[in-house]
Amino acid sequence: MRTDPTDNGGLFVGRRPGTAPVRYRGVPERGSAKRRAVDRLLSGAILAAMILICLAFWGPIPAGGLWIAGRVQYVTDNLGLALLAGFVSLMVALFGGLAVLKRLDQAWILVRRAAGFDQRQGVLRFVFPVTAAIGVAAFSFWLIIIAGPGASLAPGS
Amino acid sequence: MGIRGYYKQFEALSEEEVNAGKRADAAARRQRELARVDPLDLTRTTWPEYPPPSIVNAITFAARRGLHRYLDRHATQLRGELAHLHGVPTERVVVGDGAAQLMSSAAQALLEPGDELITPWPSYALYPVMARRARGHAVPVPGFGVDAILSAVNPRTRIVALCNPNDPTGELMSRDEVARLLDALPERVIVLLDEALRDYVDPAIEARDAALDLGEQHPRLLVFRTFSKAWGLAGLRVGYAVGGPGAEPLLERLEPELGLNELAQAGALEALRTAADLAARRGAIIVEGRRELTGALAQRPVAVAPSQANILWLRAPELPGAELAARLSRAGVDVAGGGRLGDPDRVRIAIPHRPELRERLLRALDGALGTVER
């Protein structure tokens, strides 16, 4: 006799794992068609904000950290303190950014559901790696081609 | 509802919250199941536990080996094992679809229209039925004694059907008494000795095959045994009959025309080969339980017939059997009312095989008799 419910011979006899319907605390009161359209736009705006923040990790935030370190060194003439200030500000900005991204992702899910989509998971898990790939590629291009040996290998180009 | 509240309502329950609800449901279900107590069924004379897995496996193996061909219709192997067990030649053993079928066949073979079958009463309810089916008459004799039987014998008497130990009373007719009966009966009367409950007889009182030995001196004795009771294989419907020297032609007539089915043969054969002491062990359990239970019942206001079977034939003064059975049933213990078994003032109680179940029976009985505050 088969007693193990997961022993199904490789077939999913019930629901596939992870495909259970979303269970709400109560039945949500959905907005009008106009409101849903606004929610669709809003979800797009949130997505755009998430993309910008993610991209900021690979340029503006490190640059901001360097700027702070430079300002500290200029004012205090202390390299160690400048490095510490730069590092701390970088970490705060990175982790703060991640916290904001997580909240935005959750908000994006709720707005998408309000817009009428059966949204089960967030979009951050796609946005972050894609923007990271773009950011790394752009940084590498700047580092190697624009700011690095490329400039000396092909001066004037 | 504010903007925050509007979007908050789309928040899903976390997995933990969903599971908490399911866990609560499961706990409530488990609680209900634990609180439920199944009735204790003491209406049957069969063994209450499942057969040993080896026997079930043997039946399964026989089924898988192939049921597309005809079987050994004379059940040679099974009869050989039984003959070896009882120390008789194979020709003097016949197997059939339960002891009842073999006895019924014996009645068909022996009774002419108008012939009589004598049986002590109350006894196994099938005996009058098999007499009627063979176009004979059943003559129930009150009590369970040799003299009562002999007093009912007349020229039309052809069969004496004797359930020993008796169902439903549990009484045992000793070997000497059976011998006296056989000696006193006219030449034409055949004794069908139904020993379905024989395994429950206390070996200190009488050996298991004591009556079987009588066949050597009395060829008019047929002894019937079954795998349905102590062996716990009632679903297989296997019984057998053992006769004395010269009984072979009659035994042949009892055999099912096309033999015993192959699965039943496989199960019975495996039981004999790998669990030979099973019936004896279960018999010992019942002997112990019976001693304990009759001791406890002796201190209560009930009358119990002396039993050598796995049943007790019990009467409560001023309480009809049906009423006693109904009260016990309300307390979660089912027993067989005596009305259909031959005495409406009594109930037949199968002896529980475990001490805690005997305790439960006694508690229910005390409640039914009103000897304790309920």
Image (tube, helix red, strand yellow):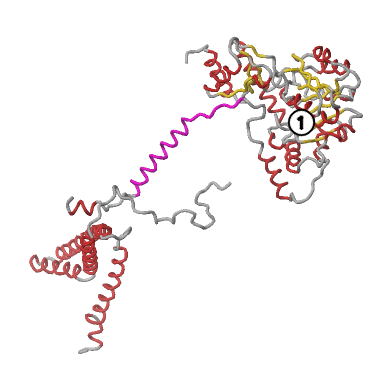
Q: Quadrant of residue B193?
A: top right
- Chain to which mark 1 belongs: B
Q: Main secondary structure of the magenta part?
A: helix
The residue that appears at 72% across and 28% down in the rendered structure is B280
**Most foreground residue, B296 or B218:** B218
**Most foreground residue, B340 or A97:** B340
Left or right: residue A59 compared with residue B31? left
The residue that appears at 83% across and 16% down in the rendered structure is B176
- Relative to B316, is B358 above or below? below
Looking at numbered disc 1 in the image, what kind of residue is underneath it? Ala
Tell me residue B358's x, y (percent): 58, 21
> Is B41 in the magenta?
yes
- Relative to B359, is A151 above or below? below
Tell me residue A76's x, y (percent): 9, 65
> Is B46 in the magenta?
no
**Most foreground residue, A70 or A57:** A57
Number of numbered labels in the structure image = 1
The residue that mark 1 highlights is B99
Tell me residue B245's x, y (percent): 91, 28
Left or right: residue B116 compared with residue B296? right
Give the SS element for disc 1. Answer: helix
Q: Residues within 10 Å of mark 1 (few under 14, many from 20)?
A: many
Tell me residue A86's x, y (percent): 17, 65
Q: Quadrant of residue A47?
A: bottom left
Q: Which residues are magenta?
A: B15-42
- Relative to B300, is A139 above or below? below
